[in-house]
Amino acid sequence: MTAPTVAQALREARAQGVDRLDAQLLLAAALGQPRCWLLAHDDAVLLAAQRERFAAHCERRARGEPVAYLLGEKEFHGLTLKVGPDVLVPRPDTETLVDWALELLRNGPARPEVLDLGTGSGAIALAIAHAHPAARVCATDICAGALAVARANGARLGVDVEWLHADWWAAVAGRRFDLVLSNPPYVAAGDPHLAALGHEPQGALAAGADGLSALRAIGAQAGAHLHGGGWLLLEHGHDQAGAVQTMLGAAGFGAIETRADLGGRPRCTAGRWIRGG
């Protein structure tokens, strides 16, 4: 069997149904080279071990396994995070939530207290703590495996976050924060899109019949954990902005606003706590 070149290997991956960018990322990893190297060396010949690794990863990718799981890492807000099946793959759209939080923090207290609920890989908490070192950041997750991933990411990056194993607010009873943010599960249990996300933890994706149960659980208790004037920022489905705005208004929040993700879809909603605290 003739050893394939870079160009041939990429063509074979595309024939399997692997996206062009995904194929390039997987091949670059198999060769131990940056992706840009492939463009200048499309006639380079793959060694047997490289060919076998690339072929195995392409087969798994064609079955729907996320590239981030195959590579073991994902970049988020300038940080390279280790990821695996215990955590959702961080999405670029969630950077909208982080950027909004950082904007608020720049105009807030000098040493703000920040809470990330359902941290998963730690992406949000670590991005906040890294970009705003004055913030004292706490993060919770009910999944011990996810929290282990987050804690390891923090240690490897040298970013200080307080990690707590708990469901939503359970570990922070009696504590108040200047800013709370969360990217909770928000997909309806019967949503057909869940089938394409079968490799990711379903508990971090689906939230009841309408996808709003986690958002309701967070919103219902948020006021008890925010200082007066504190902010709650939530990521949600593109068709849930109205429901989340109504929920926050009924819970006692003001200055309610929704912002769009990178694709222009309403993705994040925030409100400011106005009932004292």
Image (cartoon, rainbow, N blue to C red):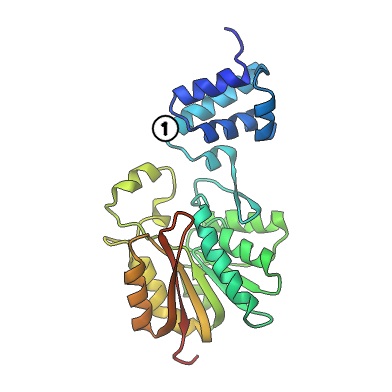
Left or right: where does residue 257 sit relative to residue 42? left
Q: Count up the numbered dots.
A: 1
Q: Can you give x and y, in whole percent of width and height, for residue 96 in the image?
A: 52, 62
What residue is at 38 percent from the left and 72 percent from the top?
Answer: 217
Which image quadrant is residue 238 in?
bottom left
Q: Can you give x and y, in whole percent of width and height, for residue 5 in the image?
A: 62, 17
Is residue 62 depicted above or below 115 in this figure?
A: above
Is residue 175 depicted above or below 240 in this figure?
A: below
Which image quadrant is residue 9 in?
top right
SS at circle 1: loop
| Mark 1 neighbour class, 10 Å CA radius: few under 14, some 14 to 19, many 20 or more | some
Which image quadrant is residue 155 in?
bottom right
Left or right: where does residue 189 sit relative to residue 125? left
Q: Is residue 164 visible?
A: no
Is residue 156 depicted above or below 32 in this figure?
A: below
| Nearer the observer, 9 or 265 | 265
What residue is at 26 percent from the left and 60 percent from the top?
Answer: 209
Location of mark 1 (residue): 63
| Nearer the observer, 211 or 162 | 211
What residue is at 30 percent from the left and 57 percent from the top?
Answer: 188
Is residue 216 depicted above or below 50 in this figure?
A: below
Quadrant in which the N terminus appears = top right
Q: Is residue 202 visible?
A: yes
